[in-house]
Image (cartoon, rainbow, N blue to C red):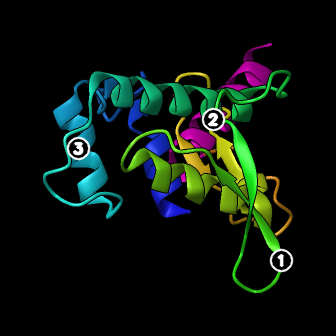
Protein backbone atom coordinates (compact mmCIF):
# COMPACT_ATOMS: atom_id res chain seq x y z
CA UNK A 1 0.00 0.00 0.00
CA UNK A 2 2.97 2.28 0.61
CA UNK A 3 3.76 2.46 -3.12
CA UNK A 4 0.15 3.37 -3.94
CA UNK A 5 0.23 6.15 -1.32
CA UNK A 6 3.56 7.39 -2.70
CA UNK A 7 2.12 7.40 -6.22
CA UNK A 8 -0.94 9.37 -5.12
CA UNK A 9 1.36 11.83 -3.37
CA UNK A 10 3.47 12.49 -6.46
CA UNK A 11 0.95 15.32 -6.74
CA UNK A 12 1.45 17.37 -3.58
CA UNK A 13 -1.37 19.90 -3.27
CA UNK A 14 -0.45 21.13 0.22
CA UNK A 15 -0.53 24.93 0.52
CA UNK A 16 -0.49 25.48 4.29
CA UNK A 17 2.23 27.14 6.33
CA UNK A 18 3.89 25.40 9.25
CA UNK A 19 6.35 27.02 11.62
CA UNK A 20 6.45 30.03 9.31
CA UNK A 21 7.40 28.01 6.26
CA UNK A 22 4.93 27.96 3.37
CA UNK A 23 4.50 24.63 1.62
CA UNK A 24 4.58 24.94 -2.16
CA UNK A 25 2.57 22.43 -4.22
CA UNK A 26 4.65 20.15 -6.45
CA UNK A 27 4.20 17.46 -9.08
CA UNK A 28 6.85 14.73 -9.34
CA UNK A 29 5.56 13.44 -12.68
CA UNK A 30 6.57 16.33 -14.90
CA UNK A 31 8.41 14.40 -17.63
CA UNK A 32 9.02 10.95 -19.06
CA UNK A 33 12.40 10.89 -17.27
CA UNK A 34 10.75 11.80 -13.95
CA UNK A 35 8.25 8.95 -14.40
CA UNK A 36 11.08 6.51 -15.23
CA UNK A 37 12.99 7.60 -12.14
CA UNK A 38 9.92 7.30 -9.88
CA UNK A 39 9.03 3.82 -11.21
CA UNK A 40 12.64 2.60 -10.82
CA UNK A 41 12.92 4.06 -7.30
CA UNK A 42 9.83 2.09 -6.25
CA UNK A 43 10.85 -1.16 -7.94
CA UNK A 44 8.12 -1.05 -10.56
CA UNK A 45 10.35 -0.88 -13.61
CA UNK A 46 14.02 -1.65 -14.18
CA UNK A 47 16.47 1.22 -14.41
CA UNK A 48 16.75 2.36 -18.01
CA UNK A 49 13.06 1.96 -18.93
CA UNK A 50 12.16 4.90 -21.13
CA UNK A 51 8.46 5.76 -20.84
CA UNK A 52 6.93 7.72 -23.68
CA UNK A 53 4.76 10.83 -23.49
CA UNK A 54 1.73 8.49 -23.77
CA UNK A 55 2.97 6.50 -20.75
CA UNK A 56 3.38 9.71 -18.76
CA UNK A 57 -0.14 10.77 -19.74
CA UNK A 58 -1.49 7.35 -18.67
CA UNK A 59 0.27 7.57 -15.29
CA UNK A 60 -1.03 11.08 -14.66
CA UNK A 61 -4.54 10.05 -15.74
CA UNK A 62 -4.43 7.07 -13.37
CA UNK A 63 -3.26 9.28 -10.50
CA UNK A 64 -6.01 11.85 -11.17
CA UNK A 65 -8.70 9.15 -11.40
CA UNK A 66 -7.57 7.53 -8.15
CA UNK A 67 -7.43 10.85 -6.30
CA UNK A 68 -10.91 11.73 -7.64
CA UNK A 69 -12.23 8.39 -6.43
CA UNK A 70 -10.97 9.21 -2.91
CA UNK A 71 -12.41 12.74 -2.93
CA UNK A 72 -15.89 11.99 -4.21
CA UNK A 73 -18.18 9.08 -4.94
CA UNK A 74 -17.14 7.41 -8.17
CA UNK A 75 -19.78 8.04 -10.81
CA UNK A 76 -17.72 7.08 -13.83
CA UNK A 77 -15.45 4.07 -14.15
CA UNK A 78 -11.71 4.45 -14.44
CA UNK A 79 -10.50 4.74 -18.00
CA UNK A 80 -8.39 1.62 -17.49
CA UNK A 81 -9.99 -1.62 -18.74
CA UNK A 82 -9.96 -4.52 -16.28
CA UNK A 83 -10.21 -8.26 -16.91
CA UNK A 84 -10.34 -11.51 -14.96
CA UNK A 85 -7.23 -13.69 -15.11
CA UNK A 86 -6.37 -17.03 -13.46
CA UNK A 87 -4.66 -16.54 -10.09
CA UNK A 88 -2.62 -19.75 -10.21
CA UNK A 89 -4.65 -21.38 -7.41
CA UNK A 90 -7.69 -22.30 -9.47
CA UNK A 91 -9.45 -18.97 -8.92
CA UNK A 92 -9.66 -15.68 -10.72
CA UNK A 93 -8.36 -12.22 -9.93
CA UNK A 94 -8.98 -8.82 -11.46
CA UNK A 95 -6.12 -7.43 -13.53
CA UNK A 96 -5.69 -4.34 -15.63
CA UNK A 97 -5.14 -4.32 -19.35
CA UNK A 98 -1.57 -3.32 -20.25
CA UNK A 99 -1.05 0.45 -20.17
CA UNK A 100 2.67 1.22 -19.97
CA UNK A 101 5.86 -0.31 -18.58
CA UNK A 102 5.90 0.24 -14.83
CA UNK A 103 2.44 1.80 -14.83
CA UNK A 104 1.04 -1.72 -15.34
CA UNK A 105 2.70 -2.93 -12.14
CA UNK A 106 1.36 0.07 -10.25
CA UNK A 107 -2.15 -0.47 -11.60
CA UNK A 108 -1.94 -4.14 -10.58
CA UNK A 109 -1.06 -3.03 -7.03
CA UNK A 110 -4.13 -0.76 -6.97
CA UNK A 111 -6.37 -3.53 -8.30
CA UNK A 112 -5.02 -5.93 -5.65
CA UNK A 113 -5.64 -3.34 -2.91
CA UNK A 114 -9.22 -2.87 -4.09
CA UNK A 115 -9.73 -6.62 -4.25
CA UNK A 116 -8.49 -7.34 -0.72
CA UNK A 117 -10.17 -4.33 0.90
CA UNK A 118 -7.10 -2.22 1.70
CA UNK A 119 -8.20 0.52 -0.71
CA UNK A 120 -11.14 1.31 1.62
CA UNK A 121 -8.57 2.59 4.14
CA UNK A 122 -6.82 4.97 1.74
CA UNK A 123 -7.93 8.56 2.32
CA UNK A 124 -7.20 12.10 1.25
CA UNK A 125 -6.60 14.42 4.18
CA UNK A 126 -9.79 16.32 5.06
CA UNK A 127 -7.88 19.60 5.38
CA UNK A 128 -8.68 21.56 2.20
CA UNK A 129 -5.16 23.02 2.09
CA UNK A 130 -3.51 19.60 2.35
CA UNK A 131 -5.21 16.68 0.48
CA UNK A 132 -2.25 14.35 1.19
CA UNK A 133 -3.06 10.66 0.60
CA UNK A 134 -2.62 8.38 3.59
CA UNK A 135 -3.49 4.89 4.77
CA UNK A 136 -5.95 5.10 7.67
CA UNK A 137 -4.66 2.93 10.50
CA UNK A 138 -7.30 4.01 13.03
CA UNK A 139 -9.18 1.20 14.70
CA UNK A 140 -12.59 2.17 13.31
CA UNK A 141 -11.37 3.37 9.91
CA UNK A 142 -12.60 6.90 10.51
CA UNK A 143 -9.31 8.79 10.16
CA UNK A 144 -9.70 12.21 8.58
CA UNK A 145 -6.26 13.80 8.66
CA UNK A 146 -2.90 12.69 7.31
CA UNK A 147 -1.37 13.73 10.62
CA UNK A 148 -3.18 14.52 13.83
CA UNK A 149 -0.15 16.56 14.92
CA UNK A 150 -0.34 18.81 11.85
CA UNK A 151 -3.65 18.89 9.98
CA UNK A 152 -5.84 17.54 12.77
CA UNK A 153 -4.37 20.00 15.26
CA UNK A 154 -4.76 22.97 12.87
CA UNK A 155 -8.39 22.06 12.14
CA UNK A 156 -9.33 21.50 15.77
CA UNK A 157 -7.54 24.67 16.91
CA UNK A 158 -9.34 26.71 14.24
CA UNK A 159 -12.73 25.28 15.31
CA UNK A 160 -11.92 26.00 18.97
CA UNK A 161 -10.99 29.61 18.20
CA UNK A 162 -14.17 30.09 16.17
CA UNK A 163 -16.27 28.79 19.07
CA UNK A 164 -14.49 31.05 21.55
CA UNK A 165 -14.94 34.20 19.46
CA UNK A 166 -18.43 33.38 18.20
Q: Position of residue 44 (x, y in %)?
A: 36, 59
What is the quadrant of residue 121 in the picture? bottom right
Percent from the top left, x then y, of residue 71?
72, 28
- How many other residues sit within 10 Å of disc 2, few (<14), some (14-19) or many (≥20)? some
Residue position marked by numbered label 3 in the rendering:
36
Q: Which residue is mark 2?
A: 66
The span picked out in magenta is 146-166
Can you identify the residue that label 1 sits on? 91
Q: CA distance from mark 3 to mark 2?
A: 20 Å
Q: What residue do we see at 32% from left, 60% from top? A: 42
Q: Earlier in the sequence, mark 3 or mark 2?
A: 3
Mark 2 to mark 1 CA distance (whole Å): 27 Å
- Residue at 57% x, 59% y is 109
> Which quadrant would residue 156 be assigned to in this image?
top right
Tag 3–tag 1 contact (CB < 8 Å): no
Q: Quadrant of the N terminus?
A: bottom right
In this orientation, does residue 140 appear? yes
Sequence order check: which comes first, mark 2 or mark 1? 2
Residue toward you, 20 or 127: 127
Amino acid sequence: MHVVEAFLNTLDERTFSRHGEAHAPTDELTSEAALAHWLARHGLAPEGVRPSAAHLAAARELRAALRRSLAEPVTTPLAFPLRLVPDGEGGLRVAAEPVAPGVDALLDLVVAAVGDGRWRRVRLCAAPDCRWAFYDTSRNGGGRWCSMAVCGNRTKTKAYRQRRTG
